[in-house]
Amino acid sequence: MQDKRAEPDVSEHVKRLWRLSPGHQRGRPAELDVEQVVRKAMELADRDGLGGATLPKVAEALGFTKMSLYRHVGSKDELCELMGDLAIGPAPEVDEAAGWREALRRWTLTSRRVYGRHPWLAQLPITGPPVGPNAIGWMDALLRALRETGLDWPEKLGILNLLGGYVRTASALEQQLTQGRLDSGLDQAQSERDYGTALSPLVEPARFPEAAKLFASSVFRTPAEEGAEDEFGFGLGLILDGIEALIAAQADIRHGSSQGIH
């Protein structure tokens, strides 16, 4: 007897995310499919930002009416989720032999590069946990990196949210600061010098004792040449140090429990 696996009982939205067959359809084959729609939306977002990937603009770029797109994409929110999962692509390979710390570092830096290629990713609305196949792949890669750490599932999910949120927040902040400098016509060093010069007289020691010391220092007058990537790496290092401390603490707890049993 032939083994026929049952069709998953999932919503149409999830079927589109996972590119599952919509089932038997009568009539001529559709001229459009979800892949074409989402790839065109990504192309517009890469060129014009997220605001350039509205359903009417995607339909116009494809040469179809807006209503014809609803057969393949249920709403603008669904289009955003489809775009996000396609844009992040397959998860990076995890070299467990390199150790959890290096694996997480590579995972995070790879994610950072993806956000650099598609800046609009940091602007996508978050309406729930990961659902798409690529997003689940990234989740699985991080969980494999943590497989031998002894951490429990809530802690591993917490690390997933922490690192994913760090990449998203850092990318959005960098975009906004870069845009602000473009609008002002100043480079980063001049922008920081102007900031220090303007605020220094207002930050009085009696009211802001530690901040006043900061503004009196040379940190804004002679900004370091480190860029956004150096700042990102610094923050990532602190996060990994915290994860390392958590793993060590959990190991001590388990060791103490085993000692108590004997």
Image (spheres, grey):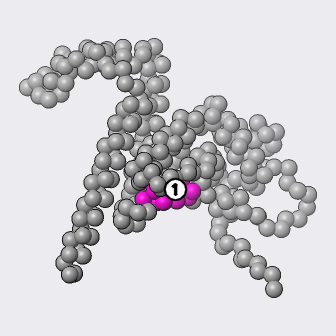
For the point 76% across and 78% down, which residue is it? 4
For the point 25% across and 61% down, which residue is it? 249
Q: Magenta segment, principal secondary structure?
A: helix
Q: Is residue 137 magenta?
A: yes
- Residue 114 coordinates in the image, percent (x, y): 55, 40
Q: Residue flagged by tag 1: what amino acid is it?
A: Ala
**Residue range of the region highlighted in magenta in the rendering:** 136-146
Q: Is residue 45 visible?
A: yes
Q: Which one is in front, 92 or 165? A: 92
- Residue 112 coordinates in the image, percent (x, y): 49, 40
Q: Which quarter shows the N terminus?
A: bottom right
Q: Is residue 105 magenta?
A: no
For the point 38% across and 58% down, which residue is it? 158
Q: Which one is in front, 109 or 39? A: 109
- Residue 176 coordinates in the image, percent (x, y): 45, 30
257 left or right of 174 in image: left
41 left or right of 24 in image: left
* Quadrant in the picture for residue 203: top left
Q: Which quarter shows the C terminus?
A: bottom left
Q: Residue furthest right?
A: 28
For the point 36% across and 32% down, which residue is it? 231
Q: Residue furthest left?
A: 206
Q: Is residue 84 visible?
A: no
Q: Which one is in front, 238 or 207? A: 238
Query: To which residue does mark 1 refer?
Result: 141
Eyeballing the image, is 57 above or below 33?
A: above
